[in-house]
Amino acid sequence: MEPQKHLAGPVTGQIEELSKGIQALEETLARFKALDSNFHEMQYLIYSYVEKIKEGLVLIQDEMVIWANRAGCDILGYQLEEVINKSAIEFAHPRYRRQLSARFAMVQAGDEIPAGVLWPFLTKTREIKYVRPFSYRVMYMGRPAIMSFFYDVTEDKKLQEELSMRSEMLDLVSDSVFLIDMVGNIKYVNKAVCQSLGYTQDEITNMSVIDINPDELKRKAEIRVKTVSSEKEGRFKTVHVRKNGSRMPVDVRIKVIKRGDQQFILGVVREIIPEGIQEI
C-alpha cells in the first residue's frame, strides 16, 4: 500500500494543474466570446450608421464600385445591385468622365487633391445631379482603393445660379439696392451702392445701415429698422453719408421680404438731385 501513497501526490498535483488550466481556458474563451459579441455589435452599429446617414458613401477600386450605402444609391436613383461591380466613371456626365478617371487614379495612388469639387452625375432617369465628394485612399483586400463620401448639392447650385443671375440683373439697375437683416446689418448691395457711397462690397457688407446715416439721423434710422412693416412698403427721404464724408440726400423705399424662414429688409435708394442741376 505504501507505493500507492507515493503515487497519489504527483497525480493529485497533475489533476490540480489540469483543473487550473481548464479554468484559465474557460475564462479566456469567455473573454473571446465577449470580444466577439462586442465586435458584432460594433459591426451592427457601423452598418446602421452608414445605412441611415443622408450622405452617399461608396468604395471604389480600379474605378469599379465595390460597395455603396443606401443614400449613395438613392441620390442617383439606382438599386444597390445596379451599381455594384459597375464602373463608377459611367455614372458621371460624359463630358467629365475623363477628368473623373484621372482624379480617381490620383486618389488611389495616394496623391492629395482639392476636396469638395462639384461633379455632375447622371441619375437612372438621365437627370443631372451635382454632388460634392470627399475622397480618401484606403486599403481593401490588400490593395489601394478609394472611400468617397458625397452629398447632393443640386438644389444649392440652382439657388446659387439664381442668386448670381439676380445679382447681375441688380447690378444693371441705376438705383442703389440694399438687403438688410432685421437689426440693420447690411447683407448685400448692388454696384450702384458702392459707386454712390464710395465703399467696396466687402467694406459695406461689414457695416450697419445705421453707419451710413449722419449722427443726427442715426436714432431715427434705428427706429425705422425696428418698426418697418411686413404689410406695406415704407417710403421716406433721408441723408446718406459717403465714405469721404460728403452728404447725399436720398429717397428711400423699404419693404420686408422673406427668404425661407428668415426675414430681411429690401431697400431701394435713389439720390435726390437738387433743382437746377441736370442729371447726366
Image (spheres, rainbow, N blue to C red):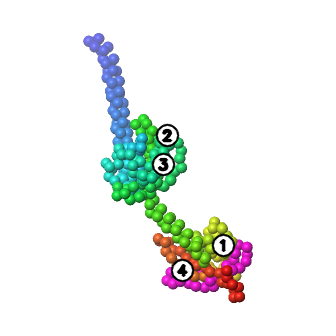
12 horizontally vs 227: left or right: left
The mark nearer the N terminus, 1 or 3, is: 3
On the image, numbered disc 2 is attached to which residue?
109
The mark nearer the N terminus, 4 or 2, is: 2
On the image, numbered disc 3 is attached to which residue?
99
Q: Residue 267 or 2: which is nearer the viewer? A: 267
- Which mark's residue is nearer the viewer, 1 or 3? 3
The mark nearer the N terminus, 1 or 2, is: 2
Q: Label 2 is placed on what type of residue?
A: Ala
On the image, numbered disc 1 is attached to which residue?
195
Cα–Cα gap, marks 4 and 3: 47 Å
Residues marked 2 and 3 touching at CB (< 8 Å): no
- Which mark's residue is nearer the viewer, 1 or 2? 1
Cα–Cα gap, marks 4 and 2: 56 Å
Where residue 191 appears, as percent x and y from the top left, is 62, 71
On the image, numbered disc 4 is attached to which residue?
255
Q: Is residue 250 above or below residue 203?
A: below
Check disc 1: other Cα within 10 Å, few if <14, some if 14-19, many if 20+.
few
Task: Give the secondary structure at mark 3.
Answer: helix
Name the residue furthest right.
Answer: 245
Q: Quadrant of the C terminus?
A: bottom right
Q: Label 3 is placed on what type of residue?
A: Gln
Where residue 55 appears, as percent x and y from the top left, is 42, 54
Q: At 49% from the left edge and 40% from the top edge, which residue is drawn?
A: 109
The mark nearer the N terminus, 2 or 3, is: 3
Cα–Cα gap, marks 1 and 2: 51 Å
Task: Give the secondary structure at mark 1.
Answer: helix
Check disc 4: other Cα within 10 Å, few if <14, some if 14-19, many if 20+.
some
Q: At 39% from the left edge and 43% from the top edge, which residue is drawn?
A: 64
